Image (cartoon, grey):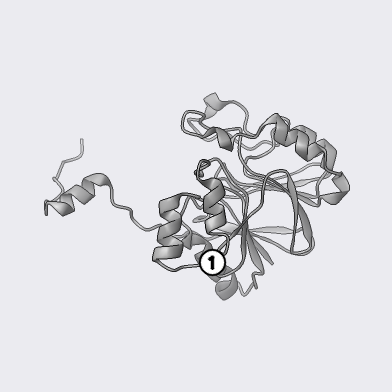
Amino acid sequence: MILLVSDTHSYFQTVNEQIAYAENTLNVPVSCVIHLGDFGIYKSNLHDFFTKQKARFERPLYFIEGNHEDFVGFPWLTKKYKEYFTHLPRCTINTIGGYRFLCLGGADYMDSMVTQQGAVISDKHIDKCLALAPEEVDIILTHDCPRGIGVPNTPGFEHYGETGFSRSEELIAHFKPKLWLFGHHHKWFQFQDSHTAYYGLGSSWRGFGLLDDNFQVQFVKNDINLPHEETLFEKLLAKFKLTRPNIAPR
């Protein structure tokens, strides 16, 4: 069984906790993990987990990039830590667990003010994908969702317009994949058209998906408590041995 996760945002330990839940609680053997983006490629977070803590994933992990990664350091960081995980580059077909996956990281539906240019899915990426033969692809993996399948807006983000990335409808028409898997929106989502079943995953601390050897996907919702990270204010209080002021609510 392939375990599907998305949007760890550098909370790498959640991957191992979900593997353990699948295997020890559900008695489902996990062959590998496929991560659907916003993995958390940042120097300090990678160093802390893999070097300082000497941790590693319990099963082989493959990932596409999301829009929250360090795209400046991305090439050398993925090379430096390649013994711990495998990046699936954009516009490439990769065979994992008997399936042929077309991989397209990045996003379109996002806050352009805080997202690096390297995250953006461009016309060049779409054209490169469309040059591939449709019979060579079983499943499409993207971080952002395709447009027009009904993924709802997150409240407060309506001004971004329709969810999904442009020209995704061309990929649907060209490949007609049996499955399309995505993350990004932190929502559990399912939709079926005449050719394709679409599945959107929640964040890694909310659960995971299981992909069997017959194109069937099962959602497993399993909440994980994330570790508390001290704010700068809390660190200053601790440094000077002060107590948090007791402010009455208004």
Q: Residue at x 57, y 44 (%)?
A: 66
Q: How many marks?
A: 1
Q: Residue at x 43, y 61 (%)?
A: 49
**Picture quarter containing residue 186?**
top right
Q: Residue at x 56, y 67 (%)?
A: 19
With respect to residue 47, does 167 lie above or below? above
Pinpoint residue 165: horizontal percent, then vertical percent. Answer: 66, 33
Query: For mark 1, what is the residue?
Result: 57
**Picture quarter containing residue 216?**
bottom right
Work out whether residue 124 or residue 111 is closer to the camera in this orientation and state it.
124
Pinpoint residue 193: horizontal percent, then vertical percent. Answer: 79, 41
Helix, strand or loop at mark 1: loop
Is residue 100 visible in the rendered image? The answer is yes
Q: Residue at x 17, y 54 (%)?
A: 238
Question: Looking at the rendering, in which quadrant would you find the C terminus?
Answer: top left
Q: Is residue 99 left or right of residue 48?
A: right
Q: Is residue 231 left or right of residue 180?
A: left
Is residue 148 visible in the rendered image? The answer is no
Work out whether residue 108 or residue 79 is closer to the camera in this orientation and state it.
79
Q: Is residue 125 left or right of residue 84?
A: right
With respect to residue 130, does 215 lie above or below? below
With respect to residue 99, does 231 lie above or below? above
Q: Amino acid at mark 1?
A: Phe
Mark 1 burial class by Cα count in 10 Å: few <14, some 14-19, many 20+: some
Pinpoint residue 122: horizontal percent, then vertical percent. Answer: 67, 31
Question: Looking at the rendering, in which quadrant would you find the N terminus?
Answer: bottom right
Pinpoint residue 151: horizontal percent, then vertical percent. Answer: 63, 38
